[in-house]
Structures are given as structure tokens and as C-alpha cells.
Amino acid sequence: MSYLSEKELYRKYMEFFETAERKRRWRVFDDIDWDLAGKVEPTDDAVLCAETFCAVESYMPDYVAEGLNLVRESFGQAWWHVNWGYEEAKHALALREYLVRTGRRTMDQMIDFEADVLRKRWTLPFGTIRQMVCYGALQEKTTWMIYRKQMLATRGSGDELLTSIYRFISRDEAAHGGFYLDVIGSCLAEDREGTISDLHHVFSRFTMPAYDLVPDYESRVRVMRAVGIDRKAFLREVFLPIMSRLQVGRRELARAAAQEAARRQEGELPTPPG
Ligand SMILES: [Fe+2]
Ligand SMILES: [Fe+2]
């Protein structure tokens, strides 16, 4: 598999890190007005959603460990991954603090919940770095869309505290997605056919990370649909903008799909489960 040079990956990491340090950093203890915790009245749905996102972000040890092992020989990618892990850890922390400080969950309940969550383990959904970059772009952009929709819903219900937390988190998710898209752009310039094949491979099998690992998954997803998080929104706000930004046409993806099907028929690739 063809992939980017270490020099280019390092340069991308440094650009991302410099912008993050200079312009995007936010502090859990100083930038969130926790005095609001005693004043807001979160709805049950908002609490359930915050707890769901907290659970998904709480797989951070698996995300970091699995991802870091995959890229450990690349300085730029390994250092980027650790910075990314720090930001994701902060997301889980802010949501956890929100649930406890508003009195909607006790510390003991959160500890039990997190222990329950981590009883299952997240593993890498794809086997190569470039496929994981494609997955990262789709996953981060979807996460951004979800937080943004939640932010609009909590703003509408007058929960300024959760709105401000979602604003900080969604800004981070947008930056993560942007980084992956930038890397994919370089991959396309270097090996267009191979990269589009990976894009098709990942996009046709995509599911959100860890959602299916979180306890009571189905009822949680039902609540999220109520604020407009569904397949239509995914296509309109995530998939199509990604394709447009990458300047990859549907025909190119269809060609990659046909090539994959042909290779499977010839026995070069295993038939995917399901
Ligand atoms: Fe996150
Ligand atoms: Fe993220």
C-alpha cells in the first residue's frame, strides 16, 4: 500500500498542533461556567444523550491504545494521536462533570456506569492506516454533526451550560475531521485509485464507534433521532460535504465498488459478514 512520506505527516501534525495550541485550546475548569450547574434544568432526554456521548468518549483508552499501536512507527501520526486522545479525554470529562454537577447522576452512578461501559472493548474496525484515516474522517465529521444538533436542541431548551460544553466539543470534532480530510487529500494526490478504493471500503461498512457497545444502545439511539440525527442528516451534512471537499465523484466510488465485487468473485477478497 502506498502512503504519505514521514516528512509530510510530520508537517501536517505540526500545523494541526500549532493551531490547536494557539487558537483552539479550552479549559474544563476555567472556560465552562459551572455556576450554571445549579440553575439549569436539564430535560431527561438531554441527560440521556449527554450520558450516551460520555460513554462513547469513555472508550478513550481503547481508541488511544489501538490507534497508537497502528501508527507507533510514525512520529507525526503517533504524536497527533496522543494530542487527539487528550482532546477526546476532555470531552468525556466535561460531560461527566455536567451530569454530576447538575445532580442528575451521582459520582457512584458514574463510576458504575463507566465500569459497565468498559466491560466491552472497542477494537479497530479497519486494518490499515489509510483505511483508518478514511474512517476517522467519517467518524469525526459525524460526531461533529451529532454534537452540533445536540447543541441547537439544548440551546432551544435553555440549558446554557450543556450548550457551551457542546460548543467546545463540536469545535474539536470539526478540527479532527478537518485533519483527516486534509490527510486524505494528500493520499488522493499520491494514489487516487487506491485511496478511493479505501474510501469505498470504509464508507460502505461504516458504523459509529462504540455505539453498539454502550448499554441500552437502542433506546439511546431512539432519543437521538428526536433531534434529527438520522440517515438523511448523515447524507446531507456529513457524506456529501466530505465527497465535495475531497472532490471525489459518485462514479469513482461506484467504480471502486464494482472492482471490489469483481475481486471478491475471483476469490481475492473474503465475503464480508452480514
Ligand atoms: Fe470527542
Ligand atoms: Fe474527535
Image (tube, rainbow, N blue to C red):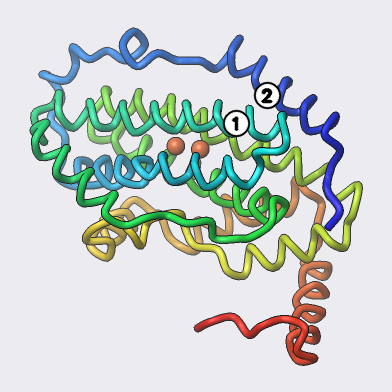
46 lies left or right of 73: left
Residue 5 figure quarter: top right
Label 1 residue SS = helix
Per the model, the C-alpha gap separating discs 2 and 1 is 8 Å
> Does the residue tagged 1 have its C-beta within 8 Å of any atom of ligand 2?
no
- 26 above or below 157? above
Which amino acid type corresponds to the residue marked 2 in the rendered image? Answer: Phe
Which one is earlier in the sequence, the residue at label 2 or at label 1? Answer: 2
Q: Are marks 2 and 1 in contact (CB under 8 Å)?
A: yes
Q: Position of residue 237 (x, y in %)?
A: 57, 50
Q: Nearer the viewer, residue 20 or 84?
A: 84
Who's the residue at 32% across and 54% down the image?
224
Name the residue carrying label 2.
Answer: 16
What is the residue that sits farthest to the right in this orientation? 190
Q: Position of residue 20 (x, y in %)?
A: 59, 18
Which amino acid type corresponds to the residue marked 1 in the rendered image? Answer: Ala
Q: Nearer the viewer, residue 199 or 34?
A: 199
Residue 50 figure quarter: top left
Who's the residue at 36% across and 11% down the image?
31
Image mark for residue 208: none
Few, some or many residues within 10 Å of mark 1 (<14, 14–19, 20+): many
Q: Position of residue 66 (x, y in %)?
A: 52, 47
Who's the residue at 64% across and 60% down the image?
127
2 lies left or right of 158: right
Q: Position of residue 202 (x, y in %)?
A: 64, 63
- 263 above or below 125? below
Who's the residue at 28% across and 29% down the image?
162
Name the residue carrying label 1.
Answer: 175
What is the tally of numbered marks visible in this picture?
2
Few, some or many residues within 10 Å of mark 2 (<14, 14–19, 20+): some
